[in-house]
Image (cartoon, helix red, strand yellow):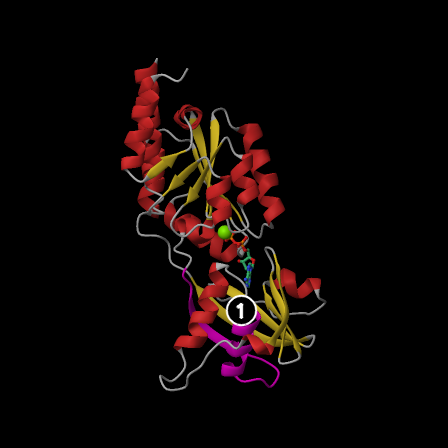
Amino acid sequence: SVPLSFFGGIGGASRLGILVKGSNYLEALSEVDTVVFDKTGTLTSGTFGVVGVHPAGGIDGDQLLAMAAHAEAFSDHPIALSVKKAYLDEAPADSGRIIDQARIENAAEESGHGVKATVDGHAVLVGNDKLMSAHGISCPDCELTGTILHVAIDGAYAGHIVIADTVKDDAAQAIADLHAAGVERCIMLTGDREEVARSVASDLGLDEYHAQLLPGDKVEQVERILDSARGNLAFVGDGINDAPVLTRADVGIAMGAMGSDAAIEAADIVLMDDKPSNIARAIQVARKTMRIVH
Ligand code: ADP
Ligand code: MG
């Protein structure tokens, strides 16, 4: 039988907007010494602004953004939402600009790489340098800071769009609180570029980061970190490309407001307000509950 104080602990957490799916997760959480974070949508807001459009090979900037927005039409990735928003927002108010689904065929997501689709009969690729090299398209090295979306049309490089995300208001405090609570390692895993990962990690005071990971690489990294952890490992994500990692961790924590249904399903704990600072709070509630139980 489950001691009554567990219900107190679960109830106390839920009043803070922290939904715990079972008393065993409170117990596991009380022994966490490593917290691994996904970047986009977890430590950062996941709402990217377009900060540069750099067409190449004859297309103009507006056409480049239009092709990218249409190729991203069916993706729910934070990057896709941001490109579509930029395309719609940058239109003159009376233009009636829409994303016209009749222009799009064969849209498909390539997890951790980007998207491909046929737009107006042209084969369009939008994504990172891995996507481009997988399709044999060479792209320039970008020294710019930000997340770079390369675009190729009919097998030819057509330019890149630079987008930038911001770290969440409470993210640095969240890491400081975890360290103060005795969590030894706060680690970030991301599919984004090394340059972006390095700057977020140093802004937030993370102990370690790993960049340019595919969804499967994130599982491998978590398994490697699990091997060297003395206590339990919590993984925090938004479920976009990271649901398998949520399942693999000792405690999977999902961002509930912006996170996907897959994340809420796969997680053991759901943060209703998407604030990373609630993780340290949840650990405190869990430890307090365990002191009462024992
Ligand atoms: P993160 O690990 O930061 O949460 P993801 O694993 O979701 O990021 O994505 C990794 C990388 O894959 C992104 O930084 C981007 O380069 C590329 N990518 C993923 N989805 C898309 C998309 N819909 N459009 C363009 N690029 C994408
Ligand atoms: Mg993600």
Q: Of residues 177 and 101, which is closer to you in this image?
A: 101
Q: Give percent across and percent down for residue 130.
A: 64, 60
Residue at x 40% of width, y 40% of height: 270
Query: What is the residue that sits farthest to the right in this orientation?
Result: 136
Residue 290, image quadrant: top left
Query: What is the residue that sits farthest to the top in this orientation?
Result: 294
Q: Of residues 18 and 127, which is closer to you in this image?
A: 18
Q: Can residue 133 be found in the magenta stretch? A: no
Q: Can residue 49 be found in the magenta stretch? A: yes
**205 lies above or below 72:** above
Residue 49, image quadrant: bottom left
How many discs mark residues in the rendered view? 1
Is any part of residue 188 visible from this angle?
Answer: no
Residue 26, image quadrant: top left
Looking at the rendered structure, the secondary structure element under dot 1 is loop
Residue at x 30% of width, y 17% of height: 292
Question: Is residue 282 toward the left or the right of residue 119 in the image?
Answer: left
Q: Give percent across and percent down for residue 73.
A: 53, 69
Residue pointed to by mark 1: 73
Q: Which quarter of the image is occupied by the N terminus? A: top left
Q: Give percent across and percent down for residue 223.
A: 59, 34
Residue at x 42% of width, y 83% of height: 96
Q: Is mark 1 within 8 Å of ligand 1?
A: no
Residue at x 55% of width, y 40% of height: 245
**279 lies above or below 169:** above
Is any part of residue 257 visible from this angle?
Answer: yes
Q: Of residues 238 and 226, which is closer to you in this image?
A: 238
Q: Which quarter of the image is occupied by the C terminus? A: top left
**113 lies above or below 35:** below
Find the magenta span and give its range. Answer: 47-71
| Circle 1 residues within 10 Å: few <14, some 14–19, many ≥20 | many
